[in-house]
Image (tube, helix red, strand yellow):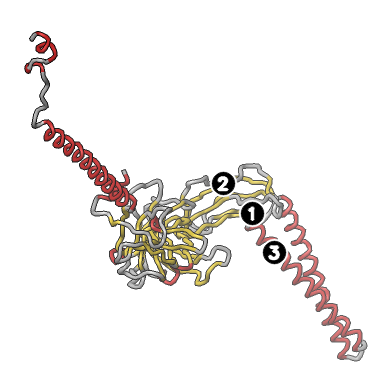
Amino acid sequence: MSEQHAGEQPDILRHKRPRHLGTIGIVALLAAVGIVALGIVDRVNANQELKTWTDAQAVPTVDVISLSSQLGPRSLVLPGDIRAFNDAPIHARVSGYLKQWYTDIGAHVKAGQLLAEIDTPDLDQQLDQARADLATAVANQHLADTTARRWAGLLSQDAVSRQDADEKNGDLASKTALAAAARANVQRLLALESFKRIVAPFDGIVTTRSTDIGALINVGSTNDVPLFSVADERRLRIYVRVPQSYSADIKPGMTASLTVPEYPGRHFTATLATTAAAITPETGTLLVQLQLNNADGVLKPGGYAQVKFDLPAQDSALRAPASALIFGDTGMSLALVGADGRVAIRPVRISRDLGSSVEIASGLTPADQIIDNPPDSLRPGDRVRIAAAGEGSANAH
């Protein structure tokens, strides 16, 4: 009895499998499979979203400009040279020494006013000699005239031959010519004597004085410099060189605005007086002369000015910013955005360069939309996205 009980185990110690254990395992397996599948789906979706985002970022955002809004009046700004209406460098006509000068730079002078005097001892001696030669020539002329009249009387009495009488008349003509030459020489020297007085040729201001008392004046030397310079500053001439492409718009009578460095913000009005009516081959420009009333003496001759011309608008001209130009081996071109959002590179011909903008002669229409500051990597056929208002600057930052 005891052995039977020893070979058998009590019921309380036996392990019985729970009936719902298989169900739990199946559910856990399904859950694990679902989690794995959900992770795979999420990863696929994330990769797809990343690819979509990357493709979207690969499409560049560009700013476009409408050409139709660029039409309007034009302005042309060019450098100009300010000159006095009359400007005369005064040279000496006779050699000598400066005896005295009476006006210095900045002095207002009248026409004919004495500026300086020159002492010319050599010229004075030449004049005295010329007068003596004239007296001798006149005396010889009178003697020849008396002799010719006497021989003419003797010829009437057949006392002398006609040949002798003709010789005396010829001698009279020769002496008369010598007297006239001596008289002309005296007049020449008297004219030179008048140049001992240096006078102002017109009303104006003495702008330079390059001599002093006792200075040697040698006419005809290589270092001959003007003794004085007188300028009439009440009116000014402004010379501007206009490029040939603008020459058709420049007409006498039109006005221009001037600015000078010494008066920032102040504008002066000048009138176009005349043009050279010819293009300078070396520079390809038209020389233009403007005139300006300077009665108050504000502007100074010899200065520099910025001259602004207001030119009429051209309906046929299209204007594009210089930042939109593409420089290539074949010339200038612009990048356009088509209706399909793709890029087209179109060659253009520039008629005028206005600095910050250019006028397009051919290659564009007012309906075209050009790309401003096109990237270097942009190629024909690339897809681009047009930036909304304010988006372009944000993207740039």
Residue placed most toward the observer, 313 or 321: 321
**For numbered disc 2, what is the local secondary structure?**
strand
| Inter-mark Cα distance, 3 to 1 | 16 Å
Quadrant showing the N terminus: top left
Residue placed most toward the observer, 72 or 103: 72
| Observer able to see residue 232 | no
Q: Which mark is residue 209?
A: 2
Q: Is residue 361 above or below residue 19?
A: below
- Residue 268: x and y in percent read 35, 56
Q: Is residue 195 above or below residue 145?
A: above
Look at 12% across and 31% down and name the residue there.
21
**For numbered disc 3, what is the local secondary structure?**
helix
Q: Which residue is mark 3?
A: 188
**For numbered disc 1, what is the local secondary structure?**
loop
Does 7 sit left or right of 65 as displayed? left
Look at 48% across and 56% down and name the residue there.
83
- Residue 160: x and y in percent read 92, 87
Does 247 sit left or right of 47 as displayed? right
| Inter-mark Cα distance, 2 to 1 | 13 Å
Q: Which amino acid type is marked by label 2?
A: Arg
Q: Which amino acid type is marked by label 1?
A: Ala
- Residues at discs 3 and 1 in contact (Cβ within 8 Å): no
Quadrant showing the C terminus: top left
Q: Which amino acid type is marked by label 3?
A: Arg
Mark 1: give few (<14), some (14-19) or many (20+) Cα within 10 Å: many
Badge 3 or badge 2: first in the primary sequence: 3
Please, which residue is most extreme toward the front here? 1
Look at 41% across and 64% down and name the residue there.
345
Badge 3 or badge 1: first in the primary sequence: 1
Q: Which residue is mark 1?
A: 92
Task: Locate residue 358: give its quadrant.
Answer: bottom left
